[in-house]
Image: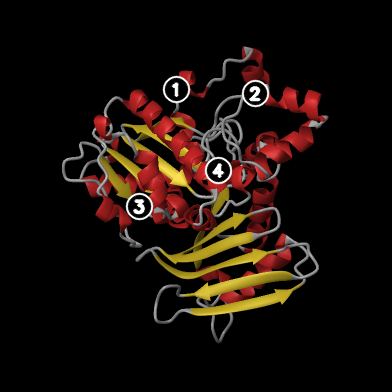
Amino acid sequence: MKFLVINSGSSSIKYQVIEMATESVLATGLVERIGEAVGRLKNTFYPGTERERESVLEQAIPDHDQGMRLVIALLTDPEQGIIGTTSEITAIGHRVVHGGEDFRESALITPAILDAIKRNIPLAPLHNPANLDGIRVAMEIFPTVPQVAVFDTAFHQTMPPHAFMYALPYRLYEQDRVRRYGFHGTSHRFVAGECARLLGKPLAECNLITVHLGNGCSMTAIAGGVSVDTSLGLTPLEGLVMGTRSGDVDPALHLFLQQNKGMDLESIDALLNKESGLKGLCGMNDMRDIHKAVAAGDQRAALALNVQTYRNRKYLGAYMAVLGRVDAIVFTAGIGENDAIVRAESLKGLEAFGIRLDPEKNGQRAREARCISRSDSTVQIFVIPTNEELAIAREAATVVSR
């Protein structure tokens, strides 16, 4: 039961091979700089074990087809590979960013499913075409292997209309599907399931707030195990302050910048997505660099940290109001899992709501899931490492077993 997980980007392919019987990673890697003069394939066999081996290959990789064939050649290499032939792959799970309103769950890929993914390209013009490239290549290389599309947006399709609708002319929803969709759904679903296990309760009985903090950030309110609200919207720009994305701003900012700075829409979009967030405030988007700068007395770095964690607190408060009862808050992703300062500042002042962080537990570093709240906290606080590749593999296993 070896599953291949593929996350195909515009110029990259991330992949893992997972042995599903033990849920252990046999190989993980990244093909990057596809289409550039020199591409790069970095692969690790048996990561995190005594058998771990890394290899790096640099050469021209003109397209996704060539990139995927290099990966398969490495995985099946007689001397170091972890599979004999492609027939040893039982199923393939593909990350697909946008499923629109077409998909509430993962789906076995058929011509009709491919058409639906194409229909949603206007909602994710940078991501869905790249995801389709990965699917097409994999279907050519593995023509008899079942392949499953796992959608970032599917988990949030349980949101009620009052949560996903914008107060815009209704025709924009009817004609152009303008609404909140949310993203990072695979991560939020995974850590919610892990949290329910740690709480010793069925997921369907849990009310949770999951906080995904990385270079991209999002927060989700989960009632009875399903998403009822989330911070990312029509695009991955809305909501929390992120590494280079602004999060919430006044919608009239676009007109202001056009009238006063002479900027066109493309320039404004680039500014909000690539030059804003933490980077816009202090020139840095790596939180480790920001902490060093704060310690050295950099006021702009301190401002960036305060702006981000203040926004986190506002959304936590809003989602507590949405849920009424909250069993646990879960921090995940790169910053959420590793940054004790951001966690503490994001929860600062919420003690009156039953949220009591244990400073000693919060300050400890560990790779495994753990509780960091005090014993008298009525809302438990967890740090749970996300594992989107394993989540995709589990989804694929569920779909192919139907």
- In this rendered view, identify the residue nearer to me: 14 or 310: 310
Q: Earlier in the sequence, mark 2 or mark 4?
A: 4
Local crowd at mark 4 within 10 Å, few (<14), some, or many (≥20)?
many
Which corner quadrant of the image does residue 78 belong to?
bottom right
Q: Which residue position is annotated with label 4?
A: 242
Closer to the camera: disc 2 or disc 3? 2
- In this rendered view, identify the residue nearer to me: 131 or 343: 343
- Expressed as whole percent of the image width and height from the top left, the position of residue 268 reads 74, 34
Q: Are marks 4 and 3 in contact (CB under 8 Å)?
A: no
Q: Do the residues labelled 2 and 1 touch (CB within 8 Å)?
A: no
Q: Which residue position is annotated with label 3?
A: 384
Q: In this view, does 204 lie to the left or right of 265?
A: left
Give the spatial CA distance, label 4 vs label 3.
Answer: 20 Å
Instruction: Give the structural element (helix, strand or loop) at label 1.
Output: loop
Instruction: Give the structural element (helix, strand or loop) at label 2.
Output: loop
Which corner quadrant of the image does residue 222 belong to?
top left
Local crowd at mark 3 within 10 Å, few (<14), some, or many (≥20)?
many
- In this rendered view, identify the residue nearer to me: 333 or 73: 333
Q: Which of marks 4 and 3 is nearer the N terminus?
A: 4
Instruction: Give the structural element (helix, strand or loop) at label 4.
Output: loop
Closer to the camera: disc 4 or disc 3? 4
